[in-house]
Image: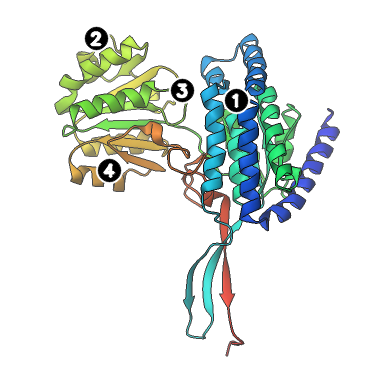
Amino acid sequence: MSISDIKSYMQSVGREARAASRLIARAETADKNKALIAMAEAINRDQQALLAANEKDIARAKENGLETAMIDRLALSQKGIANMAEGLLQIAALADPVGEISGLSFRPSGIQVGKMRVPLGVIGIIYEARPNVTADAAGLCLKAGNAAILRGGSEAIHSNQAIAQCVREGLTAAGLPESAIQVIETTDRAAVGELITMQDYVDVIVPRGGKSLIERIANEARVPVIKHLDGVCHVYIDDQADFDKAVHIADNAKTQRYGTCNTMETLLVHTAIAAKILPVLGKIYLDKGVELRGDEAARKIIAAMNPASEEDWATEYLAPILSIRIVDDLDQAIEHISRYGSQHTDAIVTENYTRARRFLREVDSSSVMVNTTTRFADGFEYGLGAEIGISTDKIHARGPVGLEGLTSQKYIVLGDGQIRQ
């Protein structure tokens, strides 16, 4: 497509999305749920077709020399497809937030004032690699009463279009407009530039992908953006931690999966427990092929550890690399997280209730955890059915963004003939 053709195409997509958003905003909960269930059934039925489409994307990704972390995010498995379908069913089972009224109270004038939850309108989602985002985003946007324009990465074009067919089938089965969820068919990057500047048709943009993509969108968008840039996540092992818990949590937080934004990138260990626990953890990491980078104190305990640079403390590796620092106390751990963290997800392992409460209160991240792995920072695990992304912003939505994050509130006022004196 030429630039003018892409502009015309995107404007057409935007117009259709805006028209569909008005129909979806007033759709009955039963109809939205019917569509979601039909989407899930189509995904389960077409599992082999989805795997075949994904194999095409994987083969091309390898030919083009995409890095291992990107291919890991791109890959679909039978379990992954089943999880996509299960996510849609979970969304269908969730309460519909649209129309929910809260805070209704009488004023001295006799009027009642409250708030009603309403859809945002048209949501543009721009994402790389992960094909499951196509189903997750479609389901969440639909249940929250929004239309969606989905622009996946070129590396996942076959997978995304195959999933999109299941989404359209679900909408049709429920008598809802197919244009409520549109997956952009062109891989031209110019389509992204159009999408993030279509103020007349798009109400919010959600980018999911690498830092360069998100920075570009944040800098160039003329539409509000819900985003996070980095996932520099920490686990702090306190000197009053349960040893076995700490080992299992620190292992899982790093090695369960390397290429995700909620994977631990820096391990902080209290000096009083370091000599006991680091040799155990070091063997686990090294046996699994994890490169270790640490401060001088940590390197004295684990000889096979490389020195950590200042840059390492603030790096999201998305790879089998881990930074380790020994700290004097909880204050130093919190200070380190405040200085180098990305306000994504941070965890403490401790049996000391007071320190756990301090960590929860003072660590300013979108998810803060006690005695569990950072890998749980996920909409599916939080019971949101799925997530449209993680937000580290502080306005509107924060943390995994589910149904509530895809709605807004408006004031409603109920009267019985009162007039202002």
Give how far across and how far down residue 96 sits, in percent. 55, 54
Instruction: Categorize mark 1 by other alpha carbons within 10 Å: few (<14), some (14-19), many (20+).
Output: many
**Does label 3 or label 1 sit earlier along the sequence?**
1
Against 129, residue 148 (above or below) is below
Residue situated in front as seen by the camera: 391 or 163: 163
Per the model, the C-alpha gap separating discs 4 and 1 is 34 Å
Model colouring: rainbow
Per the model, the C-alpha gap separating discs 3 and 1 is 14 Å
Depth check, mark 1 against mark 2: the one in front is: 1
**Looking at the image, which residue is at 61% across and 87% down?**
417
Quadrant of the rendered structure where residue 243 is? top left
Q: Is residue 281 left or right of residue 415?
A: left
Circle 2 is placed at which residue position? Answer: 303
Give how far across and how far down residue 408 sits, in percent. 57, 57
Instruction: Determine whether label 4 and label 3 are within 8 Å by CB.
Output: no
Q: In which quadrant is the N terminus drawn? A: top right
Instruction: Determine whether label 1 and label 2 are within 8 Å by CB.
Output: no
Tag 1 secondary structure: loop
Q: Is residue 187 left or right of residue 321?
A: right
**Does label 4 or label 1 sit earlier along the sequence?**
1
- Residue 318's tag is 3
Give how far across and how far down residue 173 sits, in percent. 71, 43
Circle 1 is placed at which residue position? Answer: 129
